[in-house]
Image (cartoon, rainbow, N blue to C red):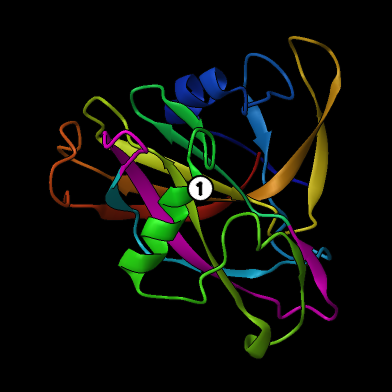
Amino acid sequence: MRRLYVLWPMVPAWLAAGVLVSVRLPALGFPEPEMVSGAWLLDFSADKPRQIAVPDLLGNVHWYWYMTYKVVNHTESEQLLIPEFTITTDRGDIIEAGDNVPTNVFRAVREQVGNPLLESPLQIVGKILRGEDHARESVAIWPAFDHNVDTMSIFVAGLSGETTFVMNPMTHKQMTMRRTLMLEFALPGTGELRGEPLIKKLNHRWIMR
């Protein structure tokens, strides 16, 4: 049986993102991932988010965030890898990685990282074979914020086969929630996006989203 927990501090941001679904109101309890799950689960590691400035075809410079990551399949069989990244902030921003990101930004990131074997967000979608030798590396990229942001959360889906179903209290329709990795960072002074801000990792945990 799944346990329910309450995340009162997270309610406003998540409700704005449409990712918190209560099972019964007004308690706002949310499914928690199984402590021991029978579903497949991939190993995921990532560097801290970094910034990059990339000019467009007209020479105008645009700023982006990116986060390189690595996925390893230690399950008993090959899996289908379709990573999805959603970014939210304490200012109410909700961004899907890859949206409004020109293809030349990936090339700039790969050059800055210095990894010629880094796969693009499109290339990494597909089968991932078992073992460290078949690990796959890619990057999530999203446009920079044009205002100060103090905290940023990155939700990574597509790493597990664990799902559960809940009833949406607004639509009264059943919704599927997936096991999702939540990474939280503190980003003081990122509004001007000049130079590398001091980024501190606050937390990481599995949730159902």
Q: Is residue 126 above or below residue 172?
A: below
Quarter of the image for residue 74 reads: bottom right
Estimate the x, y position of residue 103 in percent, counting from the top left.
51, 48
Estimate the x, y position of residue 104 in percent, counting from the top left.
44, 50
Instruction: Say whether residue 189 is magenta.
Output: no
The structure residue drawn at horizontal position 61% and vertical position 22%, both measured from the top left corner, is: 18
Report crowding for label 1: few under 14, some 14 to 19, many 20 or more residues within 10 A (C-alpha). Answer: few
Relative to 135, is 160 on the left or the right? right
The structure residue drawn at horizontal position 48% and vertical position 39%, both measured from the top left corner, is: 101
Estimate the x, y position of residue 112 in percent, counting from the top left.
31, 65
Estimate the x, y position of residue 111 in percent, counting from the top left.
36, 67
Q: Quadrant of the C terminus?
A: top right
Instruction: Say whether residue 80 is magenta.
Output: yes
Q: Magenta segment range?
A: 55-81
Mark 1 is on which residue type?
Answer: Thr
**Residue underneath mark 1:** 103
Relative to 103, is 109 on the left or the right? left
